[in-house]
Amino acid sequence: MVVGLWCLLASCDPDSPQRHATEAPETLADVLWFTDEASRWGVDFVHQSGADGRYLLPEIMAGGVALLDVDGDGDLDLYLVQSGGLDELGQVVPNDGNILYLNEGDRFIRSTDPGHADQGYGVGVVVGDYDGDTDMDIYVTNVGANVLLRNDGRGRFVDVTKESGVGDDGFGTAGTFFDADNDGDQDLFLVNYIAWGIGIERQCHDYGTGVRNYCDPGNYNSPAQDRLYRNNGDGTFSDITRRAGLTSVTGNGLGTVSADFNGDGLLDLFVANDKTMNQLWINQGDLRFEDRALEWGSATDDHGIAKAGMGIVTGDVDNDADLDVLVVNIEGETDSYFRNEGDYFIDATARVGLGSTSRRYTRFGVVLADLDNDGVLDLYEANGRVTYTPEPEDPADVYAEPNVLYRGQEMDSGIRFGVLPQSGLNEDVYQTSRGLALGDLNGDGSLDLIIANRDSHPNVLINQQHEHEWVRAVATDDRGIVPHALISGRPDGSERVLTRQVQMAGSYVAAHEPAAHFGLGAATGLVDVVVLWPDGERESFGDLQSRSGVLQLVRGLGAPVR
């Protein structure tokens, strides 16, 4: 990687405000953050795009991954999405199917249950408990019919797509299970990319070299309609897309998150679109949504440019108790960090050190998380091109790029991100990376990463940062884990309040561990713990001053906060 050492934040960012001289970050060039242990963990999966020289658009987009506890034993299992290939008619070529690995504590073993192994042309994966039986189900997005797999609680799955009514047959990418109407069950929002079919495929070439290339989505001029499925509470869903107002605009959707961005007790939706304006669907109640992205300042960047949005993530970067949004984009475009001001966003990309450092690569997977447990969010981006380059980093893969790890630091001017060498590894790894999932695989309190790579094996990045204490908070009610719960707490002895969300969706075509992770820095416990439930109710759980461990926050057992 070109950066070698820490990029001295403001000096690498010509658009950044003047920094105080005392704000220069320390150099951490010799600190190892991760080791790649895919082989040791027994992950032998190899993704297959089916690329055969026709340059079909789906070939360059796929690579889904999820971390979830499928068998209720308390650890995180691994689900990887296979693509396979498409024939001359655009039909799926039979493949080995998706793979489920069961976590044995320090290694994975392949599940022998055939129920999880969907054999469609897989793109991504969405995780949630749609039937309220306290175990996690899987929704696979495909080129062609999507698939809903119901978990029987023991890690075995049944295809219930037909009877559930969620088998959309478009070009599905991202999605999220979320409670759109506060009725206690999980509805499903699906993002589609373009209305693609073999009959509209184009031939595109690199402008500089004339070499055949994958097409930009604008070449198809075919943005696709996203879908909202209401959970009927009986195992079925109803397509309420039109009724909900979501047909008012379309885009080339690749990423989505759900959160209550305006604090009204209703979950909203943010969609990252490729070369079309982002959408911010503000929940109006009664299952109606309005796109307020232009009004909120998040449809484009601060120059009015609709960027090539890929992955997306939420997080309280500035510690003001609301959720900001980060969208990652194509090579040559900066990230888009939208800081939440309560009823609008500010494009504050340059202010957090991402105004120029993020331009070099094409970013897909992305997480905002406290990877070193120091109490400040860090940023990891999984990269890989979508177009040919005459001077590739890896001659064996002209789309391969190194990933990037940014360490977050508190400075007088606010949180800033600086690049660490070799993405925290002992050397750069060149892959065409897509999905990126976050979770603690080995239960040591440090967050690990799984990266799905096109036409290659995944990376299993085991975290080596163990200097600080940590708390992992799980929010539950009588139906199990509550996604999108917002949990706040103060490290003991600190004045700073940290806010983290239970967010399973986000990144790019990936799903994460359903927990809120708090790095404690020099503190030994978390106090003043408050849960903001998705329907707007608050509960206080007081002072939970135990050393590193998992906190179970059960709705109804705390004290109501008025």
Image (tube, rainbow, N blue to C red):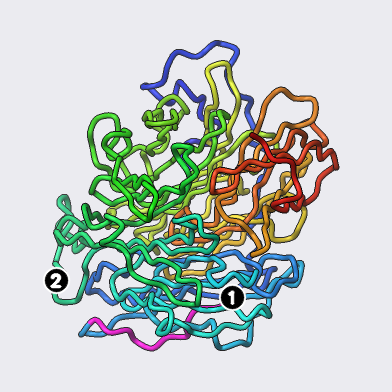
Residue located at (75% from left, 32% from top): 491
Compared across the picture, whether 149 is left or right of 490 comes to: left
Residue located at (33% from left, 34% from top): 296
Residue 35 screen position, x and y as percent: 66, 54
Return the residue nearer the eye: 107 or 424: 107
Residue located at (14% from left, 67% from top): 202
User: Around disc 1, counting alpha carbons within 10 Å, would you say few (fewer than 14), some (14 to 19), or many (20 or more)?
Assistant: some
Residue 139 screen position, x and y as percent: 47, 72
Residue 462 screen position, x and y as percent: 67, 56
Mark 2 or mark 1, earlier in chain? 1
Q: Are marks 2 and 1 in contact (CB under 8 Å)?
A: no
**Region in magenta:** 90-99
Q: Which residue is mark 1?
A: 44
Using the image, determine if residue 61 lies above or below residue 494: below
Residue located at (61% from left, 49% from top): 425
Q: Which residue is mark 2?
A: 200
- In the image, farthest residue toward the right: 546
User: What's the amino acid at mark 1?
Assistant: Asp
- Give the structural element (helix, strand or loop) at label 2: helix
- Give the structural element (helix, strand or loop) at label 1: loop
Using the image, determine if residue 257 lies above or below residue 123: above
